[in-house]
Image (spheres, rainbow, N blue to C red):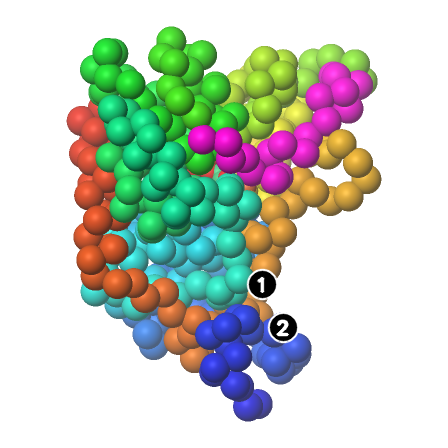
């Protein structure tokens, strides 16, 4: 098999470049040992990747794991901003992303120059950015948050301090309601969480009156109002496992259903339907990663995430603030 590494750096790997007779699970385990590598996977990854991962988590859990690992190589089965976050927090490690094109519509909704101009226009505001943003945006922020610690982060800021929240307007509006703040919101959104159909969810509730609706706070306000529980992916998973209820309508990316089904096999999990007949509740960016690409990326140690040191240090500052506040609030160890 010959691999064009230049093209890999630009475009990531192609599944067809893998010999179909290879047992990829065994081969990945072998590569982990040989290279002292750890595979970190987000809940939105395909089931095979979740099954081969050493750690599966939400953005906060993954950031923490990336920071604390003593592995030499971090293979990040997630999207670009997540792998970038791992590099920001643990720069001496080789950080790999199976497909360099695995981006994020939310991160893309905040281009650096536009955001910088917006920030300058509102210079009296403290900038809190959701972790789903590029290193450039992190570097322009005062504190980072994730969906599992955002409330605590906001509460740590004095009530009279104006806040600019970016890039997710849905999460921002939800947090404004929860905290009673009036944060100025950047107009960004996640293409997956905006696609759910409230009408179809209401119809599902009529068919399954006993079902609870679980939603991620990146969803739109009307859907969040109809939800029985709102939380990050880890929080939704925990809630579903611990709840005495047996049926759940899950309004977040479908990848989370794999762990739900594993952790509570006797319960029923129904993916919330999108507002048309596409599979738009699958994140097209997350799903660019495949087991084949994961294997090739570990074998060839490409594509690698690299970062300018000045940018990294500027992006690390608000990340450190987030981790300190989360620790003080008892959200992480
Ligand atoms: P969490 O896993 O932190 O809830 O984030 C969800 C998400 O959209 C990641 O891209
Ligand atoms: Fe980005 Fe949404 Fe995909 Fe998460 S689910 S990576 S926020 S596009």
Which one is in front, 151 or 258? Answer: 151
In this rendering, position of residue 211 left or right of residue 305: right
- Res 329 seen here: yes
Task: Say how many tags the image has.
Answer: 2
The structure residue drawn at horizontal position 52% and vertical position 85%, both measured from the top left corner, is 4
Residue 173 higher or lower than 92, as above or below: above
As drawn, which residue projects farthest toward the bottom? 2
Which one is in front, 25 or 253? Answer: 253
- Secondary structure of the residue carrying tag 2 is helix
The residues tagged by marks 2 and 1 sit, at their Cα atoms, a distance apart of 8 Å
The structure residue drawn at horizontal position 53% and vertical position 62%, both measured from the top left corner, is 101
As drawn, which residue projects farthest toward the top? 180
In this rendering, position of residue 173 left or right of residue 279: left
- Of the image marks 2 and 1, the number of the one nearer the N terminus: 2
Residue 97: x and y in percent read 44, 63
Residue 16: x and y in percent read 66, 77
Residue 254: x and y in percent read 63, 41
Q: Quadrant of residue 331?
A: top left
Please give the residue where the numbered disc 1 appears in the rendered image.
290
Residue 213 higher or lower than 39, as above or below: above
Residue 174 higher or lower than 93, as above or below: above
Please give the residue where the numbered disc 2 appears in the rendered image.
15
Residue 297: x and y in percent read 46, 72
Contact flag, marks 2 and 1 (Cβ < 8 Å):
yes
**Disc 1 Cβ-to-ligand 2 distance below 8 Å:** no
User: What secondary structure is the magenta-colored segment mainly?
Assistant: loop
Which residues fall within the magenta stretch? 186-205
In this rendering, position of residue 313 left or right of residue 255: left
């Amino acid at each position: 098999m010959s691999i064009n590494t230049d093209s890999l750096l630009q475009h990531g790997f192609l599944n067809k470049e893998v010999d179909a007779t290879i047992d990829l699970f065994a081969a990945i385990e072998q590569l982990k040992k040989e290279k002292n590598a750890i595979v970190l996977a987000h809940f939105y990854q395909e089931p095979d990747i979740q099954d081969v991962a050493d750690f599966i988590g939400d953005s906060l859990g993954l950031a923490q794991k990336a920071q604390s690992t003593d592995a030499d190589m971090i293979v990040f089965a997630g999207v670009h901003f997540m792998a970038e976050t791992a590099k920001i927090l643990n720069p001496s490690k080789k950080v790999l992303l199976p497909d360099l094109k695995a981006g994020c519509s939310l991160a893309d909704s905040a281009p650096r120059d536009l955001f910088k101009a917006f920030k300058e226009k509102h210079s009296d505001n403290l900038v809190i950015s959701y972790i789903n943003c590029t290193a450039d945006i992190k570097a322009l922020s005062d504190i980072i948050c994730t969906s599992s610690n955002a409330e605590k982060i906001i509460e740590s800021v004095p009530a009279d301090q104006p806040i600019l929240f970016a890039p997710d307007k849905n999460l921002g509006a939800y947090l404004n309601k929860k905290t009673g703040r009036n944060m100025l919101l950047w107009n960004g959104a996640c293409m997956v969480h905006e696609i759910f159909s409230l009408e179809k969810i209401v119809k599902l509730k009529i068919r399954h009156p006993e079902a609870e609706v679980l939603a991620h706070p990146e969803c739109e306000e009307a859907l969040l109002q109809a939800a029985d529980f709102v939380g990050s992916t880890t929080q939704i998973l925990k809630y579903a496992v611990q709840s005495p209820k047996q049926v759940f309508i899950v309004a977040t990316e479908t990848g989370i259903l794999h762990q739900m089904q594993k952790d509570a096999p006797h319960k029923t999990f129904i993916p919330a339907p999108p507002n048309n007949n596409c599979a738009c509740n699958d994140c097209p960016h997350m799903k660019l990663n495949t087991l084949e690409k994961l294997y090739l990326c570990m074998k060839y140690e490409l594509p690698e995430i690299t970062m300018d040191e000045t940018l990294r240090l500027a992006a690390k500052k608000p990340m450190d603030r987030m981790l300190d506040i989360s620790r003080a609030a008892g959200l992480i160890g």
